[in-house]
């Protein structure tokens, strides 16, 4: 007797794999026909401030090499901590300055409302340069799947 849930998972995984392959092919085709096409990237932060610090350095380096890139940073779980008022990096510097600088260069920062709710954190604790989205996971997936953003989890 076959397990209907396992069968369903196999279909979903095959579908997701085919969809990702289609998007990758579309992105490659776009790059091949227009080498100056804007690169779209989502940096997904889920593991806290150490990962966030690496990501912010990656984003800064990314923009130095490709100033026209469209970059979105999505945080959920422990990945929202650096986007809260007063959050500091390992050297004691507030993240707000670095986030504000990158936001002024067009980087978008998005915070998961599910995480805020689960952790009982008020939206007014989120940095002014960040916006909230209903679900960080859904936001990262939507950007990757529907809008053909490359996915990076530093």
Image (cartoon, rainbow, N blue to C red):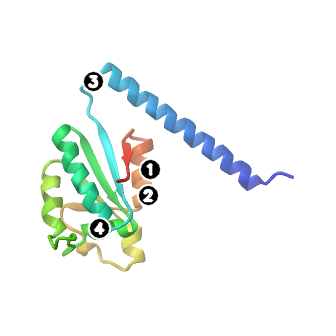
List x then y, in percent, for residue 123: 28, 72
Q: CA distance from mark 1 to mark 2?
A: 6 Å
Question: Residue at coordinates 43% horizontally, 28% vertically from top-left?
Answer: 26
The answer to which of marks 1 and 3 sits earlier in the sequence is 3
List x then y, in percent, for residue 76: 38, 64
Q: CA distance from mark 3 to mark 4?
A: 35 Å
Could you tell me if the residues under marks 1 and 2 are in contact, i.e. CB atoms within 8 Å? yes
The relative height of residue 82 versus residue 151 in the rendered view (above or below) is: below
Q: Secondary structure at mark 1?
A: helix
Could you say which disc has been placed on residue 35 in the image? 3
Q: Which residue is mark 4?
A: 49
List x then y, in percent, for residue 38: 26, 33
Q: Nearer the viewer, mark 3 or mark 2?
A: 3
Q: Residues within 10 Å of mark 1 (few under 14, many from 20)?
A: some
The answer to which of marks 3 and 2 sits earlier in the sequence is 3
Q: Residues within 10 Å of mark 3 (few under 14, many from 20)?
A: few
Q: Secondary structure at mark 4?
A: helix
Q: Secondary structure at mark 3?
A: loop
Q: Nearer the viewer, mark 1 or mark 3?
A: 3
């Amino acid at each position: 007797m076959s397990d209907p849930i396992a069968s369903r998972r196999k279909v979903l995984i095959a579908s997701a794999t085919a969809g990702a392959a289609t998007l990758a092919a579309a992105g490659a085709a776009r790059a091949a026909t227009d080498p100056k096409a804007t690169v779209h990237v989502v940096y997904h932060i889920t593991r806290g401030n150490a990962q966030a610090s690496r990501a912010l350095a990656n984003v800064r380096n990314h923009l130095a090499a490709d100033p026209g890139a469209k970059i979105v940073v999505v945080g959920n779980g422990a990945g929202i901590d650096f986007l809260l008022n007063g959050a500091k990096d390992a050297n004691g510097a507030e993240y707000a300055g670095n986030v504000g600088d990158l936001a002024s260069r067009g980087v978008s920062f998005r915070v998961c409302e599910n995480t805020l709710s689960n952790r009982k954190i008020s939206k007014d604790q989120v940095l002014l340069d960040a916006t909230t989205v209903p679900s960080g996971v859904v936001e990262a997936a939507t950007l990757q799947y529907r809008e053909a953003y490359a996915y990076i989890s530093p």
